[in-house]
Image (tube, grey):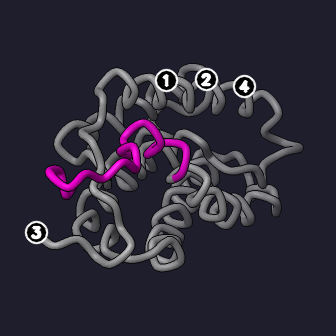
């Protein structure tokens, strides 16, 4: 496989780092959930991490992992059981389905691809809450998919950092 110009060859992802980053994103989402009413516009860090790892490691992280993470978040928030699970499962499916296409694009192109995924996940959560009788979602929630998408380059830089090779090319090692 020939890499696009400017893209570097990465080391294999460490499973401990992958699962640890998902756990850290879940903890951040739980803490952020306590302030949900006032800070609904903040990025959904768990959705961001799930989408990222579903695209970069689709054999390890996928729909089942996203569903279980959603159930954990539902229990932690005391929310309607299944609202995050449904949204994250759909997000995981979309990320796995698009993973071959999205990774060929630069950061802007990737952001344009993941924005509809984050909007769909947020919309599903709002729809489930509305159907359960919670009423209309707060208007800052409309900004959450946009802020989550804007955090995509930061997530890419941080989550791929352990996989980057040291830049010491050698005459006997062209990679």
Q: Which residue is mark 3?
A: 1
- Label pair 4/2, CB-CB below 8 angstroms: yes
The quarter of the image holding the N terminus is bottom left
Q: Which residues are magenta?
A: 157-175
CA distance separating discs 2 and 3: 37 Å
- Give me the residue at 38% from left, 77% from top: 105
Q: How many marks?
A: 4
Q: On the image, numbered disc 4 is attached to which residue?
A: 31
**Are the residues flagged by discs 1 and 2 in contact, CB closer than 8 Å?**
yes
Cβ–Cβ below 8 Å for labels 4 and 1? no
Task: Mark 3 or mark 4: name the one nearer the start of the chain.
Answer: 3
Query: Between marks 4 and 2, how big is the CA–CA gap?
Result: 6 Å
Residue in the image at 49% along x and 23% along y: 23
Mark 1 Cα-neighbour bin, 10 Å: few <14, some 14–19, many ≥20 = some
Q: Earlier in the sequence, mark 2 or mark 3?
A: 3
Instruction: Please give the residue where the numbered disc 2 appears in the rendered image.
Output: 27
Is label 4 in a helix, a strand or a loop?
helix
Disc 1 target residue: 23
Can you give x and y, in whole percent of width and height, for residue 128 in the image?
Answer: 54, 50
- The alpha-carbon separation of the residues under discs 4 and 1 comes to 12 Å
Residue shown at 64% from the left, 54% from the top:
130
Residue at 24%, 39% in the rendered image = 12
């Amino acid at each position: 496989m020939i890499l696009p110009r400017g893209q570097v060859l990465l080391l294999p992802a460490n499973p401990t780092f992958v699962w640890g980053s998902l756990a850290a994103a879940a903890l951040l989402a739980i803490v952020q959930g306590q302030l949900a009413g006032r800070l609904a516009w903040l990025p959904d860090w768990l959705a961001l991490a799930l989408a990222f790892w579903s695209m970069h490691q689709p054999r390890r992280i996928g729909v089942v992992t996203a569903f279980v993470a959603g159930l954990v978040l539902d229990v932690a928030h005391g929310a309607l059981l299944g609202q995050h699970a449904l949204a994250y499962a759909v997000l995981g499916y979309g990320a796995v389905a698009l993973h071959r296409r999205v990774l060929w694009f630069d950061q802007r192109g990737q952001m344009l691809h993941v924005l509809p995924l984050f909007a769909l996940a947020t919309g599903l959560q709002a729809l489930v809450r509305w159907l359960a009788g919670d009423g209309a979602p707060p208007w800052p929630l409309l900004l959450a998919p946009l802020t989550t998408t804007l955090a995509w380059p930061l997530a890419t830089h941080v989550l791929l950092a352990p996989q980057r090779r040291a830049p010491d090319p050698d005459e006997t090692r062209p990679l």
